[in-house]
Image: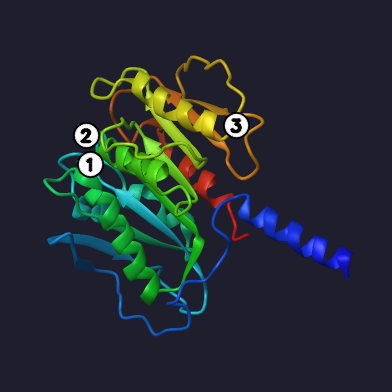
Amino acid sequence: MARKNFIVTLAVLLLTSVGVMAAKSAGCGKSPTIRSQQYSITVNGKSRQYIVRLPATYDQNTAHKLVFTWHQLGGSAQKIRDGENTNQGGALPFYGLPPLAGNSAIFVAPQGLNNGWGNQGGEDLTFFDSMVKTLEADLCIETSLRFSTGFSYGGAMSFAIACARPKEIRAIGVLSGGQLSGCQGGTEPVAYYGQHGTADSVLNVSGGRQMRDRFVRNNGCTAVSEPQPGSTSVKVEYKNCKTGYPVTWVVHRGDHNPSQTDNGQIFAPKNTWDFFSQFTAQ
């Protein structure tokens, strides 16, 4: 009996060591009322909007990943949903992730106040909390598999979530971000994917490196020398990180653009989804 109790206790410790334990949301098994469309919610007395994209064959009995996709300054939830001209600094719909996710994920495109993520007094973090609560009450979501990504200001918002809500987010993807939305806390590990251009004329790559290095430290990874990119991007996967908390960094020679290419292929979507999809419900 003592050995059995030890094994159970060890299993619990292993599960909790990588953050939130696996759990299906309250919406599992329910006939959903939320569809693929725009919704409004009141947060701190302000009307906030967000767009939901359900899988084509949503199954109310299957727990899905939940992926937040935050727009850049001057962007919008609609532009995230529809995509923009990638040759002019725009991004593919939902950063190009849905085709890679198949039916495994629910995507959310929030709308920022003044088309940005100033996060005054933590109001955008509260918006995030409210969306999670609303979505998980109605849809079948694996609560240990929440993710967040975004370009520029959207990357800043994803970073702010990792800092302030480390137990509520499994991993983030920061595309050419800067620390613009704050970093409350910022001392606990979160799996981190970041990419940045050495020729970024809007948010200097040094800021991206500082953001990355915070989670290199938090995640207990071994620092490495960053190679210089050539005609294609260079991917660095940090070593000796805490179990379940990897850090991947992609550096390229481009400017401030979420749709940089290697040999004509936009690389952010596959890199991001490869990083997110390595995680499973624990």
Check residue 220 in the rendering and tell me which mark sits there, or answer none: 3
- Compared to 146, does 206 lie above or below? above
State the residue at coordinates (55%, 68%).
Answer: 23
What is the tally of numbered marks visible in this picture? 3
Of 33 and 1, which appears nearest the observer?
1
Q: For this view, does 176 lie left or right of residue 215?
A: left
What is the distance, in whole Å, between disc 1 and disc 2 at their CAs? 6 Å
- Marks 1 and 2 in Cβ contact (< 8 Å): yes
Which residue position is annotated with label 2? 88
Quadrant into which the C terminus falls: bottom right
Q: Quadrant of residue 90?
A: top left
Which residue position is annotated with label 1? 85
**Who comes first in sequence, dot 3 or dot 1?**
1
**Residues packed near mark 1 inside 10 Å, few (<14), some (14 to 19) or many (20 plus):** few
Residue 98 spot, x, y in % from top left: 41, 56
**Residues packed near mark 3 inside 10 Å, few (<14), some (14 to 19) or many (20 plus):** some
State the residue at coordinates (37%, 39%).
Answer: 159
**Residues packed near mark 2 inside 10 Å, few (<14), some (14 to 19) or many (20 plus):** few
> What is the three-letter code of the residue carrying label 2?
Gln
